[in-house]
Amino acid sequence: MALSSFKGELKSLLAEDAARNPNSSFSTEDAERVIVEESKKAGAPAFQFDPNASPEEKAAQARAVSHRICRGEPTC
């Protein structure tokens, strides 16, 4: 495994820990953003859903991204 993938994983874990720390100003939204960014950098599909979206809307978003991946287009 490349060093860059370890750095991304470590960055994600530190973001998660910071969001859980009650003395930190790092929010869960901040952690989610870091985790999604690092996942995308690693080439993994990563999603950020509207918390008010229905399960059907979330599924449609995931399907749309997976179709683009299958055709070789960049993910959003």
Image: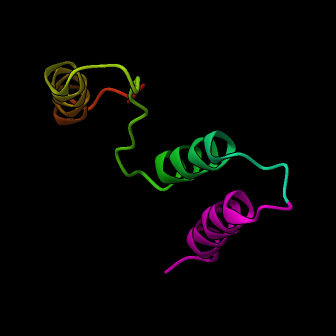
Q: Nearer the viewer, residue 4 or 37?
A: 37
In the displayed structure, would residue 10 be above or below residue 67? below
Colouring style: rainbow
Quarter of the image for residue 23 reads bottom right
x then y, percent, for residue 5: 56, 69
Residue 18 within the magenta-colored segment of the rendering: yes
Quarter of the image for residue 13 reads bottom right
In the displayed structure, would residue 48 be above or below residue 3? above
Is residue 46 shown left or right of residue 33?
A: left
x then y, percent, for residue 64: 20, 22
The single residue placed furthest to the front in the displayed view is: 22
In the displayed structure, would residue 63 be above or below residue 40? above
Could you tell me which residue is drawn at 62 percent across and 62 percent down? Answer: 16
Start and end of the magenta stretch?
1-23
Q: How many marks?
A: 0
x then y, percent, for residue 73: 31, 26
Could you tell me which residue is drawn at 26 percent across and 32 percent down? Answer: 72
Is residue 40 shown left or right of residue 19?
A: left
